[in-house]
Image: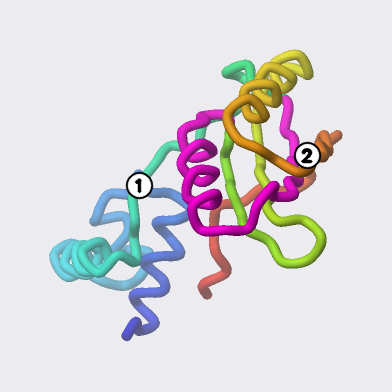
Amino acid sequence: MLDRLDFQILDALQRDATLSMAQLGAQVGLSSTPCWKRVKRLEDDGFIERRVAIVNRHKVGLPVTVFVSIRAGQHDEKWLARFAAVVSTLPEVQEFHRMSGDVDYLLKVVASSIDGYDRFYKKLISLVDLAGVSSAFSMEQIKSSTALPLV
């Protein structure tokens, strides 16, 4: 069970994981040692999965974001396992969701250009049998956040 301090710690860390224990403790009203113990427990219990740096995709040459809607060629567990294994190996795929409704799967893909996306698309369709693929290119990213609404 998480308490108010745990949520405050999680909220602060998801906004800036580089905070020292002293800085984090000051933000939530704890000294360093109790703060560290809580962070350690949150990590051990799986509330904090990992700490990462968020890289500016434009600056590293990946300005194109494509949302790829996929209709499955088959709907059995064997096909899904193969499809999930294939998609999980493709580094361009940032997110992979099984959906309800008309679309079976939705991928969020980053690419260097439309040609870069086309190379990704050709690789994807060569690796797994799909009934349909539809691509929607993001024209502008208006909001992006990794922070969950915790407090």
Q: Position of residue 25 (x, y in %)?
A: 28, 64
| Left or right for 93, reference 8 | right
Q: Which mark is residue 9?
A: none
Dot 1 or dot 2: first in sequence order is 1
Up/down of 67 relative to 29, above or below? above
Q: In the figure, residue 120 lies in which quadrant?
A: top right
Residue segment shown in magenta: 64-92
Residue drawn where x is 74% and y is 49% of the image: 71
User: What residue is drawn where x is 32% and y is 59%?
Assistant: 24
Note whether 23 is above or below 65 in the view shown: below
Amino acid type, callout 1: Arg
Q: Against 146, is 58 above or below?
A: above
Crowdedness near tag 2: few (<14), some (14–19) or many (≥20) residues, C-alpha within 10 Å: some
Please give the residue where the numbered disc 1 appears in the rendered image. 51
Mark 1 to mark 2 CA distance (whole Å) = 33 Å
Secondary structure beneath dot 2 equals strand
Residue displayed at 46% across by 33% down = 89
In the picture, the quarter occupied by the N terminus is bottom left
Residue placed under numbered mark 2 in the picture: 133
Q: Secondary structure at mark 1?
A: loop
Inspect this view and state whether residue 57 appears.
yes
Q: Is residue 31 visible?
A: no
Residue 10 found in image quarter? bottom left
43 and 97: which is toward the camera:
97
| Label 1: how many Cα within 10 Å (few below 14, some 14–19, many 20+) | few
Name the residue: 17% across, 70% down.
34
Percent from the top left, x then y, of residue 13? 39, 56
Would you say residue 8 sits in the magenta stretch?
no
- Marks counted in the figure total 2
